[in-house]
Amino acid sequence: MTTDNRVTRRTAVLSAAGAAAAAALPGGALAAVSGQTACTPLWKTALRRGIVFGSAFSTRLAEDADYVRLIDREAALLFTEDDLLWYKLKPTPESDLDFSYADQFVEFARRHRQLVFGAHLVWDEGFGDGWGDELWELSEEDARELMIDTVTRVVSRYRNKVVGWIVVNEAIDAHTDDGLRTDVPWYATIGPSYVAEAFHAARAADPHATLVLNEFGFETDAEFDTAADRRRNALKVIDALLDDDVPLDAFGIQGHLSAAGFAQAFDAHAYRRFLSDLADRGLKILITEVDVLDDDLPANNRIRDRAIAEAYKRYLDVTLAEPAVKSVMTFGLSDRYTWLQEDYPREDGAPRRPLPFDDQLKPKPAYEALSRSLDQARSRQLLWRPPRG
């Protein structure tokens, strides 16, 4: 069986934007942002504070020489946006694993002296048209064999080449008793132990990589979930995993934000407490997919850019106050390539502007906001040393 009524990061981001529609536009902290680029690349600014800055990237973008230069200049780490998703890795149930895209990605990062962060080993999306209901129809034994074999082969192949893995992505539900989503094929076939089993397989394949549980929805309320409920159940899941000696090293927070009304919707104190709770459990924290939705903002670029920059600055200032936060990754660097424009264009037709650089690769106020937050962050112990650092 499949389901289309669950809460995903996409529905949560979009419904959060709708919930904030009536709120006032943010302003104040970045009233004087000029949008002019600083001389220092973001990765260098971040590294001075013990933070690794990176961006999602895909080999499908490698032919855009200008964008490659931007990624090379600004990022010390590359997040595998789609080159390890199953629609490329295992496009049909009968396919053997195709490592050609991931091999190209890893080689690209090596040439550019960048770290690689791998995503996503176990997820309920990213399968493409070659998969239907097959995952839901597997026996427990067959599902476990498929999941464990895939995790083992992928992580083993890139052992010592990938510094961290999102082992399980988007497994948390704000409403279940144990905190886990049940509308996932791995849960339906294997049961709730699939999360722990995936982590153990990844650790066996690479004892040194940072293993991550990656989630969304902790900053502001969405239509069907409150951020408080998601924070509570995330900690419930984490506690159960740690109590069972599951090798969970870090918690990934996607950071898909919505600019309209962010100042009013974001409970900075509660969010900061959540980060502290994660750190108290001995976890590293990674901000993995930051971008800012611009729904319910006027089409005027200057107004939108100011609101988006304000959201970046307000969010990152709170987030980076926690020294357990070791990395910040944006979900792309330029509006030229953003999933929000591809999947959810604005109703008024205005191109989305969620990232630090515009579609002409020019820095926007969001770039300066990001640079300022990194520069003003507390110093901390570095988790990964970039080859260029």
Image (cartoon, rainbow, N blue to C red):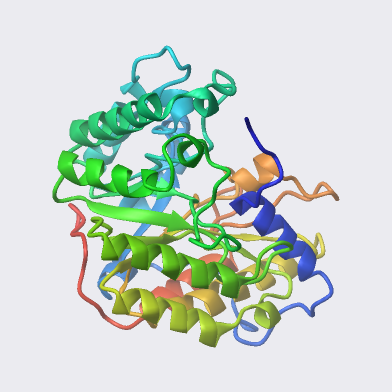
Task: Where is residue 17? Give x, y as percent.
Answer: 73, 63
- Which residue shows up at 85% across the image and 50% down it? 348
- Which residue shows up at 34% across the image and 15% down it? 96
Q: Is residue 345 left or right of residue 167?
A: right
Label tally: 0
Q: Quadrant of the N terminus?
A: top right
Quadrant assignment, res 104:
top left
Nearest the eye: 89 or 105: 89
Q: Is residue 106 left or right of residue 156?
A: right
* Residue 266 shows in the view: yes
Q: Where is 124 relative to 359, above or below? A: above
Task: Where is residue 228? Give x, y as percent.
Answer: 58, 75
- Which residue shows up at 40% across the image and 13% down it? 95
Q: Where is 279 relative to 106, above or below? A: below
Task: Where is residue 244? Give x, y as percent.
Answer: 26, 60
Quadrant assignment, res 344:
top right
* Residue 41 shows in the view: no
Residue at far top of view: 94
Nearest the eye: 255 or 132: 132
- Which residue shows up at 54% across the image and 37% down it? 125
Q: Quadrant of the C terminus?
A: bottom left
Task: Where is residue 229? Give x, y as percent.
Answer: 58, 71
